[in-house]
Amino acid sequence: MSDALKVGIAGLGTVGASLVRIIQNRANELAVTCGRAIEITAVTARDRNRDRGIDISGIAWFDTPEKLAAEADIDVFVELMGGANGPAADSVRAALERGLHVVTANKALLAASGVELAKIAEEKGALLNFEAAVAGGIPVIKALRESLTGNTVSRVYGIMNGTCNYILTRMEKEGLSFADCLREAQRLGYAEADPAFDIEGNDTAHKLAILTTLAFGSEIAADEIYLEGITNISIEDIRAASDLGYRIKLLGVAQKTESGIEQRVHPTMVPHDTVIAQVDGVTNAVAIESDILGELLMVGPGAGGNATASAVLGDIADIAKSRPGEQRVPVLGTPAASLAPYKRARMRSHEGGYFIRLTVADRTGVFASIATRMAENAISLESIVQRATPEAGDDSPKTIILVTHATTEASIRKAVDAIKTESYLVGEPQVIRIERPKAF
């Protein structure tokens, strides 16, 4: 066998420790599979003395990731620290400038600087692999970057954040409030002490931006994503969706239209009988629609030490199997210098229409007024119903549920804004898009 592939790891948290354990425990199998041994020769982390349940006594320790990237005798720099800037960004740049291969699970870094880093990697002849950055153990990066070569992708969408999916699943199945489910997610380690990055949709947006570039060959545009989180989803919305035959999921959706590329992250109603509606808990799912293959759906663990470490190890193994001088797959599927400028499309008509929940005063003429506001904006209603609230008094506010046919985002917003001016409205309207996936 050829010389061992020497690996340096920056970050020994849950994923980093799992990665060390797997490589050490399966050294012989990896050597046979990859045609060469994989050896961890250098590491760095915040606390050298922390007990991580792994043996790093024979591995060189570096005090900072920047020093490891610049000075360690390694072939591959593995970044598992996180963060769009600071040590993660500085050390990855330093490693690539040195001509080292890089493996990272850092979606925030790629969303912010992916094109720049891809250019450096391609100029230096280095590999930059990041399978673990999107959907954990699901091999969606490899699918878009390699397996679907020749296909024209029209849409990519999916459930990409386990924290949000766990909360929405618990709300539906156990009738718990958003706040109660969030607290439970934090207790179980599915949500951070400060969960805003997940529940406001930012994590999904970073992942979607990366998939958009791979799917459509455009520059990464994480700041061009329409973004809504799940903090406003109530148990009333969950129940109404179920009554109508839907489940609510936080989806990231990217699609190519005649006017450009549309990227959006928001709560979405999907029909009960679709496969993606059945993806529960912390599981992720990514769907790809293309002209040759048709529809592809990949489902699997989206986070966790072993799932993410598995994806990282797959990237390392690909590097171990590669040989100097062979043709490299472009980092972002398309050579970085050839990526098209991002052109944002207007939010277009949605096939499944919209769900609108209104709380209104119980008075004559409310239904007629709402219907008029919809008609003024050329919105066709599939249904308009008042939900019974037996526990409430006769004079208490009522809940009205509207389901529209396909219409535009602008029309919905204009109609809702007009309703907001009416004296009968109580509280803020709730608007949720309805998607009917082609195959899932």
Image (cartoon, rainbow, N blue to C red):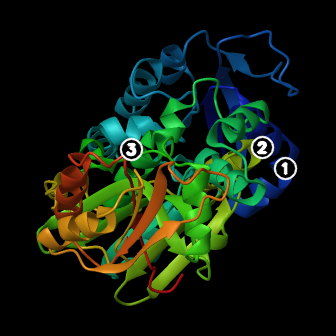
Could you tell me how far apart the alpha carbons at marks 1 and 2 are, in whole angstroms?
A: 5 Å
- Name the amino acid, label 2: Ile
Are circles 1 and 2 on residues that touch, CB within 8 Å? Answer: yes
Horizontally, residue 372 falls left or right of residue 388, namely left
Between residue 94 and residue 98, name the one nearer to us: 94
Q: Residues within 10 Å of mark 3 (few under 14, many from 20)?
A: some
Q: Residue at x 40, y 45 (%)?
A: 206
- Give the image location of residue 368, x and y in percent: 26, 69
| Picture mark count | 3
Between residue 439 and residue 425, name the one nearer to us: 425
Check disc 2 and report the residue beneath it. 23
- Residue 26: image tag: 1
Quarter the C terminus occupies: bottom right
- Name the amino acid, label 1: Arg
Check disc 3 and report the residue beneath it. 426
Secondary structure beneath dot 2 equals helix
Secondary structure beneath dot 1 equals loop
- Name the amino acid, label 3: Val
Q: Earlier in the sequence, mark 3 or mark 1?
A: 1
Q: Earlier in the sequence, mark 2 or mark 3?
A: 2
Q: Residue at x 43, y 30 (%)?
A: 92
- Give the image location of residue 319, x and y in percent: 55, 52
- Give the image location of residue 348, x and y in percent: 21, 69
Could you tell me how far apart the alpha carbons at marks 3 and 1 are, in whole angstroms?
A: 61 Å
Judge whether 113 appears above or below 226 on screen.
Answer: above
Nearer the camera: disc 3 or disc 1? 3
